[in-house]
Each structure stands twice: as C-alpha cells, then as structure tokens.
Amino acid sequence: MTEDLRRALERVVRGEVAFDAQSRALTTMDASNYRRVPVAVVAPRDAEDVAAALAVCREHGVPVVPRGGGTSIAGQATGTGVVLDFTRHMHRIVSLDPHALTARVQPGVVLDDLRRAAAAHGLTFGPDPSTHSRCTLGGMIGNNACGAHSVAWGTTADNVRGLEALTYGGDPLRTQDPIRADLRAFTDAHLALLRTGYPQDLPRRISGYALDALLPERGRDLARALTGSEGTLAVITEAEVRLVPAPPVRVLVVLGYPDEGAAADAAPALLPYGPLTVEGMAADLVDSATRSRAELLPEGSAWLFVEMPGVGEAHALRRLAGADSSVVVSDPAAQRALWRLREDAAGTATRIGTRSGESIEAWPGWEDCAVPPARLGAYLRDFRALLAEHGLRGAPYGHFGDGCIHVRIDFDLLRDAGVARFRRFSEDVAGLVVAHGGSLSGEHGDGKARAELLPRMYGAELVGLFGRFKDLLDPAGGLNPGMLVRPEPLDTGLRFAVLPKEPVEVAFGYPHDGGDFAAAVRRCVGVAKCRDTAPQGAGVMCPSFRVTGEERHSTRGRARLLHEMLAGEVVTDGWRSPEVRDALDLCLSCKGCRTDCPVGVDMATYKAEFLHHHYRRRLRPAAHYAMGWLPVWLRAAAPFAGALNALARVRPLAALARRAGGIAPERALPRLAEVSFTRWWRRTYKRPGAPAPGDLVLWPDTFTDRLSPETGRAAVRVLQAAGLRPVLPPRAVCCGLTWVSTGQLDRARTVMRRTVDRLRPVLAAGLPVVVLEPSCAAALRTDLPELLGTDDARALASSVRTFAEALEEFAPGWAPPRLGAPVAGQTHCHQHAVLGDAPDRRLRARAGLTGELSAGCCGLAGDFGFERGHYDVSVACAEEQLLPALRAARPGTAVLADGFSCRTQIAQLAGVRARHLAEVLADGL
C-alpha cells in the first residue's frame, strides 16, 4: 500500500513527496510530549497541490495532518498518515491592503515575516506568541494562538476575517460565502445549548470547537468556528487577517511583587489603563543562564511586564500600580533583553534547578489553562498546593492580564509510575480549572494533552455536539484523527517511551544530564528557536538552517534525528545512520545553540559524539585526516615552511593538495609561518625553568603558533605593557580541538591527557592560562573537562582566560592606548556561546574603538568552510552579516577578528586583513 500511495502522490503533487526515513523522522514530534510516526511528508506548492494530495489520501484511506512550524505544545502537529508541510512553499503574503487593514496569507507564512511587511505601513498583526519568529499563520489559526498582546488585540480568532480551506472530502470552504445549509440546520437545532454551554467572561477560552460562533446573533461566523480546530475540520489554503496600527512608542513597566499570587491579584486592576501587555513570571525562571538580563529586574520574587503605548502612560501606570518595586524601561535593547527572559520561558522552564548536579527536567502537558483574570491569584495558590500534594514542581508564568498560565512540570515521563502520576495530576488540575470557571486550554489548544478531559469542562452533551460537527465536515475522519474529537488517551504515545532504558556508551561526560546521551538529546523540546530566520542581533544559532531553510539543518531537526536514532524505529542504523550523518554534515559546530537555545542543546558536542561512533574502525573522509590532524602536520611542516609556501603558489600542486586533503577547490591554502611563535619566544626570551608565581601562562595554540605568530607577539607586547609577566608552557601543549570537531575523540583524549600532565606545575601554582584563540579557549573550558572528567581537567578549564579577561582581571588599572577608530569584523561564535565577550567590549571601549562586531557565524568555522562541499554554505553564512558590514565600513575602520578562522574567511572573501584585538592594541602602544 505504501508504494502505491507514493506513486499516486508523486504522480499528482508538484511539490516534494518524501517517504524516506529522514523526512519522516523530522516530523514525528512537535513541541509536546507526544510522538506519532507519519507515513510520508508532502510539501504542496499551492492549493491545487493540497487538493491533489487530499484526493490521493482519501482514495487510499490515509489520514492527513496539516503542519506549520511544528511548535504546537499539545501534540496536534503530529500524525500517523501524511503530514502536509506548508513551510516549504506555501509561505507567501498574497496581498497587504494598508487602507483596509487586512492581509491575505498562505498558511506557511511565518508571523514575523507578516509583521515586518505590515510594519512598513505602520501596522502589525496583533497576536504574537513567544514563537513569533518561527510559528506560521496556519498553525496560529489551527491553535487559535494568542501571545503577549492579546489584552490589546485579542486572539487569532479575533483577527481572522476569512478562510479558504478544503475538507478531507475535497469540498472547498470559503467562510465569506453564506454558511452551508447543513451547518445552519445543525446550529439552529441546538441554540439553547450553544448559548449556555460555554464559560462566560473568559478572554482565553481556546478549548474545544467554538460552535457558539455559529449562533445567528454572532453572525454565523464560520471562520471563527474553524479557528482553533487544530486541523481536524479542514485544511486552510489561504487566510485573510486583520492588521492593527502599531504603537509608535512602546515603554515597558516592570512591577515587582513578593510572589506570583500577589502579581496575579494585581493584574486585573491594570487593565483599565490600556496596557498592550500584562505578562507575569516568578523568580523560578531566573537562573544562572539568564542572570545578566535578570539584573534589569526590580526587587521582588515575581514580576508583571506591562507594556504601555507611551512614556507618560508608563510613568502614570507605575505610580498607580502600587507595586512593591518598579522600573520603567524605555531603552529598546534593555526591553529586548527583558522580553527574552519571558519569551525563552517555554525552554528555560524545562530545566527547573538541579538535583545532585543534574538538571531537573520539566515538561508540558498542563501547559496553558486560563481562568477569569479576577480568579487568577486564587487559582495559582490552589495550583501550587495541588503541585505539592502530588509531589511535583513547576514554574508558572504567562499572560496574567488574560488569566492564562503556562507551566512546565517535573513529571517523570520515563517510568510507568511517573506516567500514572501525570494522568492523576491532569485529571485533578482539570477539575481545579473548571472549579475556577476556566478553560483547559488558554492558548495552545487541546491536542492529545487535554482533549480527553473536555467533558469535565463542557459536559458530555456539548462534547457530543463537537463530534457531530466534526462528522458534518469530516465524515471519513481523515483529518488529524485522535485530536479534539474521539481523542486518544493523554498518557499514550509519549515520545520518551521509545528511548533506551539504560544510558548508551558515550565519550563525553554530559555532566548536566547525568552522563546520559538520551537525556541530553531530549533537552530539545521543539520550541524551534533555531528556526528563526530574521536578522539576528547578538545571536548565532543556527547558521546552516538560516542558509538552507531545511528542518534537517536546524538544531531541532538534528536533535529529532538523534532521538529517532536512539529509538531505532524510523532511523534504524544507530550510530551508522546515514540520515543523521547527512543532517550533521552542515552543522558548523559553532556552539551557538549551547547559549542561544533556551534549553541548552549542544549540537556541536552531539555531532562530535556521533562522528566518533559513526566512523569508529572505519575509513573517514579525507578532511578528517587532513584538518583533524592539523597540529601534527603543521609541526612536521615547520622546518620546510618556506618551501611549502612556494609550492602552494603553484596552482596544479595546490589543487592536488586540496584534492588529497578533502579541501574545497575554491579555498586558498593558509600560509605557514616561517618562524613560529614559540620559536620566536625562545629566541627572544630564552627563559628556562617552570613558570613562577605571578606569571601568566600564554597558551601557544596551533593557529597562533604555526599560522599567525604575529598575534602571539602582539599579545606579549600588550601584556608586558600592562605590567604582566607572560610565559609559555615549558613543553608543547594542545587543546585537542581539531580532533574533537572531527569526532576523533579517542585521539583527542590522548592529546588532552598529555597536555594536562605537562601543565601540572602550572595547575599546582594556580596560574592563569591566557588563550588568544577563542575556539581553543572554548575547547579547554568545555570539551576538555567533559571528555576527561578529572579534577585536573576541571582545574585547567577554570584557569583559562581570554586575552581581554586577563587584562581586566590582572591589570585592572592599566589604561590601553586610545585609538579612536571605528571597528568592524567578527565576534567568534565560540566567544559568544562559551566564553562571553563582555570583557572584550569593555576593553575596546577603553581603547576608544567604537561600533559593533558582527554576530552570527563567519561561516568558516574551523575545518567546516575548508571541507569539500561546504564552500557555498560557508559563503552564504558570511553574507548574512559579516561581509555586508565590511563593505559598509568607512575608511580607517579597524577590522577585528580574534579567531583565526574568522580572519581567514575575511581575507579570502573580502580581501581585507583582519587582526586580533591584541595586534590593534600593540600597534597603538
């Protein structure tokens, strides 16, 4: 049957039709606790393709699930039949009418793309869930998404003007047309129940079907009735939505309270003052990862984020709110930092503290109920008591102005007893929500997580009407079966059930995940921040997805493939899996996800782990031998550097070398230093013996030593000018980075152990180790202790300082030369993700270097941009921020890049010589 289905779909669908394991594995999960394995994934090009796919599925009796960004939290974006992926092709803004305040969009349009288009006319789309940078309009309509600004502009249902859709049976639905006779008759036969069966005074009633929208006094609004139906009634092919004027000024007022109950009690009183948002969160969500942003918060253990449309309004609200503490934030950068605290909560709330050094996992499953705002404080106190009664922990946050609460709870979904508790708690909390006059879902829909409990909210009679309504529009039951109507049990199909029960053997320590690779992989909860394609600020994640736009090249996609690799059902070859290998091939190991991902997924480490197992006792790609063993080859080549440089200028010989080494033919080979940094040091200083107290050990990394010795010489000059005593280690050392990045982890550990042994005198003396190359510093801080797991490795990691950190910590009174120049260039992605660049920013400011370096990734990323087959992606990464910034730089701009890879990329693509900050400062001495 599967082969017949494939041939039939490929015959009539012009878009992509995918039955392969990789495509199916990428769509087994959304952002929920659930997993369903599809038969195929179809990416339709237009409404005609949708109709053709539906006809084939109908003929073969195969269910269909529409899918947008895959950020649904209740499981409704997963399915066992054919998944329709609207993000590939049907993502066009068909028209935008600023006078009528409307836009027509295809279902795959990402919300932020629509908002950017509307912003050109001073408009916006009001609903804005925290996933606004990657969620789609089709998904928002399917779930009736809301977001932080619903107190001002309502839910998605309040902003949909019309829908064009297709039923599973192939019937077109245009909601602007007169309502179908059978739907009118159905409504008229049940007027009393539809008028009395729904909770009143509840702005966030998302659960179930909105059949009351079909009442005659409400205009028989079929568009509103379809919004929030979770793809169970029709497949949307186009939507007309309302736009609203965007406030020209937005000022954030942050109000502090002693606890979340007090904050919730205060929220309703703020609504008459016309806020754009009234968001709430407690101190549970402020951890070490977000502490720098949390410093902007006023005193308190819970806060309301209230956005006002003007400075005067903001100060007036602050005076009238009566909060224990408050702050008015007008600076856009500070506002963004604070909003990121709130928007990342869906991820950060999955890690609620630690137990025995390991992160405590928390999950959705009771994610977004809503009660009348006036009842929110009482509900939260009862909710906390219920958590305690069940022995559970959670960190509530959410849309306090609308009475909607999000929470991730530390359910043990890996064991039967924990799953049973999950069910008992869900049943009990459903009763609590109903007792407070609330809705089981206040934003993300019911899906598998709550549909089973709908009779507790609506009663059996009204839920029975839901089933009859479904049967009118989808009599074959082919659209998203198991959701909303005749639901699957909430404790079945959990995504964790397929994972190994015991930890698999791995090389890295995964200290925050109990040494369990499966626990590390399941960190990904699917919120898909890695799918953000908007111009980034300081972020890095995820450069390859930003270039290709393919799910398999996102951090989430790769994590999903690793999950399925461990499960062994769809991806069946384990560590030998070609599906996982191909998806990881374009991972730049930038480590951006380690910081930018709200749950700290570390794909660079997972990639190294996978490559270690995938190629164990197998022939590796040539680039792994050429660039993975780079420190060895450069050391062997040192006596012949001049001759090799001359030979590299002979084109046929250079081409042969590139071919043998698996290097992209477009790449120029780096020039070897004829006098290495360490050789220059021995000639210049001839200092014998071990490092002495007061010394700083300057790490002679391979790139500085053999390829860029001028950087090391400049650093020595600057450190000495600052009154410090730099010395080199008494013997050769290496961080093992090149072996780690190519997954040669046995060799990496050998190199690292030798390095640690050689530095024992340094460690015993407690001397700082200054590392000029950011990638090497990051390897020493993270990879080394996580691979070796010894006290000495951790001691070395804690001793590492960057160049700017060393000057700030050990020469705080030193005044750098005043250079008075603008800067351009690249912040190394490992600096962003692991090391932090705040000391560098402060040092540049003290030296009078003004402006910002490019964020993102330069695209070379160590061996990545040199490897054959990666050149185009490497260049595209550089074209996103770095190369345009260099082209726009005015004369006299200092081009900075502390990473050798970044400097090489700049030289080869922009024809500009970039320098390490140490070189620029040394020139000014």
Image (tube, helix red, strand yellow):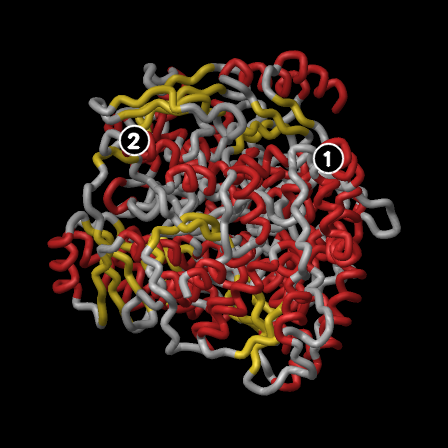
Residue 440: which numbered mark, if any? none
Q: Is residue 822 left or right of residue 505?
A: left
Cα distance in 3D space between marks 2 and 1: 55 Å
Residue at the image point whose x is 28% and y is 40% from the top: 154
Reading the image, the residue beneath label 2 is 118
x then y, percent, for residue 666: 65, 33
Q: Is residue 419 visible?
A: no
Q: Residue at x 50, y 57 (%)?
A: 916
Question: Nearer the observer, disc 2 or disc 1?
Answer: 1
Q: Is residue 485 left or right of residue 620?
A: left
Badge 2 or badge 1: first in the primary sequence: 2
Quadrant including the N terminus? top right
State whether residue 209 is above or below residue 365.
Answer: above
Q: Amino acid at mark 1?
A: Val
Q: Quadrant of the C terminus?
A: bottom left
Front-lying residue, 541 or 886? 886
